[in-house]
Image (tube, rainbow, N blue to C red):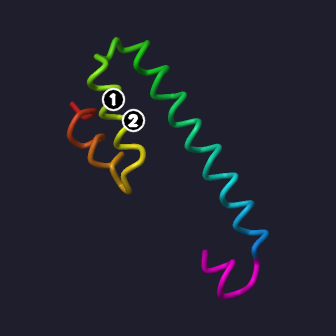
Amino acid sequence: MPLKYIWEMPQMVQVVGMAHGILFLGYIALAFMVYNELKWSLKTLAIVMIASIIPFGTFYIEKKYLTA
């Protein structure tokens, strides 16, 4: 957003936003693939999905649920 409002480069928001969206969809697809492969419960999948929309939530999930 600073690129758009401070340096008046609105086209960069589109580029960075597109990359962010593609990476987010990749994360969701990967979560479903792992859900199927590792036979996660629906609760674990739901927690992983919810964590994906909370800032830095994925780091918490990795530490709390996904490390041995």
* Mark 1 residue type: Ala
Q: Position of residue 27 (x, y in %)?
A: 51, 37
Is residue 14 a member of the stretch shown in magenta?
no
Residue 32 horizontal side relative to residue 68, left or right: right
Q: What residue sits 70% from the left and 67% below the top?
A: 13
Q: Which residue is mark 1?
A: 46
Which range of residues does the magenta coloring cover?
A: 1-9
Quarter of image, res 48: top left
Q: Is residue 12 left or right of residue 29?
A: right
Q: Residue at x 36, y 55 (%)?
A: 56
Vertical placement of 31 versus 57: above or below?
above
Left or right: 1, with 53 as reference point = right
Reply above or below: 36 against 2.
Answer: above
User: Where 25 falls versus 14 (above or below)?
Assistant: above
Looking at the rendered image, the quarter that the N terminus falls into is bottom right
Q: How far across and down, in percent of the image, does residue 2 sit?
A: 61, 80
Q: Position of residue 12 (x, y in %)?
A: 74, 69
- Numbered disc 1: secondary structure: helix
Q: Does the CB distance between marks 1 and 2 fall below 8 Å? A: yes
Residue under label 2:
49
Q: Is residue 5 magenta?
A: yes
Residue 5 point in image, percent of width and height: 66, 83
Residue 50: which quarter of the image? top left
User: Could you tell me which residue is drawn at 76 percent across and 78 percent down?
Assistant: 9
Position of 17 compared to 68: left or right? right
- Looking at the image, residue 42 lies above or below residue 2: above
